[in-house]
Amino acid sequence: MAQVRLEHVWKIYDNGVEAVKDSNVTVEDKEFVVLLGPSGCGKTTTLRMIAGLEEITKGKIYIDGKVVNDVEPKDRDIAMVFQNYALYPHMTVYENMAFGLKLRKFPKDEIDKRVKEAARILGIENLLDRKPRQLSGGQRQRVAVGRAIVRNPKVFLFDEPLSNLDAKLRVQMRAELKKLHHRLEATIVYVTHDQVEAMTMANKIVVMKDGRIQQIGDPHTIYNKPANIFVAGFIGSPPMNFINTKIVRGEGGLWVQASGFKVKVPKTYEDALADYIDKDVVFGIRPENVYDKMFAFAPTEENTVRGMVDVVEPLGSETILHVKIGEDQIVAKVDPKTKAQEGQEIDLVFDMEAMHIFDKDTEQAVI
Amino acid sequence: MRVKPYTLFVFLLPGFTIVGVLYYMLIWTGVVSTTDWIGMAPVWKFAGFKNYIVLFHSPRFWTNLKNNMIWLVVFVVPTGFIGMILAYMLDGLPRLSKFVRPIFFYPLVIAPVVTATLWAWIFEPQNGVLNNLLSLMHLDFLKAGWIADPKIAIYCMIVAGIWQNFGFALVLYTAAIGEIPRDHIDAAKVDGATSTQIFFHIVIPEISHATIVVFSLLVLYTLKVFDLVWVMTGGGPGYATEVLPYFMYRVTFRQLMVGEGAAIAMIILLMSFVVLVPISKWMMERWAR
């Protein structure tokens, strides 16, 4: 297994489109790194550059300490799992998995041993004689993973491998891939646009947008300390509430002043906001940090706001409320036993320790 | 929506008519092949299999059949492979291929008579382009009689045939290669395949449907090749380059032995059945899937 390092990597296509801009990422040995972002953010291009399927315009990519810019994919000792599985339709499952080993001239019994071992790990031993068209989506997925693991490569690359599976199977495969990572102790670079996949599987998440890396961090950091409005809004479901507000000095310290409410900034954050007093900022709070007053731990006048319930969406385990406060709309994820009804007033309590403030111009996080 | 049976019948009528005429002529040819009809006279006598027996005893018939087999082997495989390899190479060079593909396709849209005239002029022994070119390059020892030489005349025609038809193979293979999902090629690259290995292990198996269509149509072409022979050599020298369709034409319309000509036609028909039936069956099954 090995480390993968991207140093100031750029991808500029012939038509001038900049798909990847100045990427700097280090994937440590045995680490599970997820490249996360909306479509067109350059995450797949980055992965393909690591694989050697796409030329690097500028910068360097290192695998195991060696520059691989001019190394053919076959000589990089990597394996890749593709979004559409890319199984060879004319070969059986066994032949699909053995193909890479055959090309590398492994002895027959070694190939047989490895293919059968991989098939056993993935639970596809009974499918080895079938052709890909005779398999279900989930089975094809396993074969594609099997084809990668038989080679025992330095690095595994996954390109949105679960996006073609139905929701239930996706959850199952997610857990299996995570288990596989522990078992193989593999270095994995995984591309997805699904934040849940990223949060659940990654040791480290790289959030990308328009070809540029927005933030790199472990899932906990990405969720709790987003670097900017984009990351804050991309991670979490429902997404974070963003409200245009002003920081004002008032009774007992600093306050966040919105069109229809005013809440107090915790003392610990006051220093950080010193430069923003009387300035416009974007106030962010996650729906899960907004409570129905009836179920809140410490409601005070300083963190409670009143609004009008617009929509109630009961999900069973929780209830999503869309509440209008002044000119702003706030989404709250509240206790399912809430008595909130559409068209009625409700008191919401903000957990102000979990608030975020973003600079209005740069969109970077202040808190 | 339910459609009334007679409406269906009206729509099927043109199809039935055309197919009906075809089958009528097939049967008519079959019947004629067992007579001694000379075409112009309104009378004929039943001759049984005499026409076939005469043919099987004629060295000219066997030369013709042999020539058809030479066409089959020497023409079909190179034409198909040139098209396949060019399509694979051009697939990796999108800019060049935009420019080059139409050039390769032109020979196919030129009338076969023009192709034949052009190549007859190239292969002409006295003042032909090829021999002149060889003189210019001081390669006189390579000069030959070309279409005047009974040993090599047929191969000269086959070269013209390949030139005319590889564009057809190229077009079909270009489409088939374009249909291969890119990630199959990428997966093979990551798996460790060189571009030659990709060609043999991934591309050729994944375009097998095109191969069947291309090769079967090229085989059928060899069974009815006529214009190249007619214009380039007229079947000569002697009957050295004659093929069955040309023989059929001569026997029927020049020697006015319609019965014997019909017998040759039936033999050609039988040969094409051998090719057509399995392929049609295969294609029907493929479409039904």
Image (spheres, coloured by chain):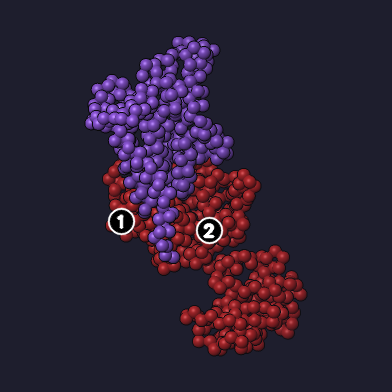
Q: Are marks 2 and 1 in contact (CB under 8 Å)?
A: no
The residue at 25%/24% (across/down) is B54
Q: In the rendered image, which residue does mark 2 sit on?
A: A35
Kind of residue at disc 1: Leu
How far is mark 2 from mark 1, CA to CA? 32 Å
Q: Which comes sooner in the sequence, label 2 or label 1?
A: 2
Closest to the observer, A193 or A198: A193
Q: Is residue B35 above or below residue A217?
A: above
The colour with which the image depicts chain B is purple
Q: Quadrant of the C terminus of chain A?
A: bottom right
Q: Position of residue A52 (x, y in %)?
A: 50, 45
Chain letter belonging to callout 1: A
Q: Is residue B62 left or right of residue A266?
A: left
Q: Is residue B26 left or right of residue A59?
A: left
Whether residue B174 appears in this view of the structure is: yes
Q: Position of residue B215 (x, y in %)?
A: 38, 37
Q: Nearer the viewer, mark 2 or mark 1?
A: 1
Callout 2 environment at 10 Å: few (<14), some (14 to 19), or many (20+)?
Answer: many
The residue at 38%/26% (across/down) is B253
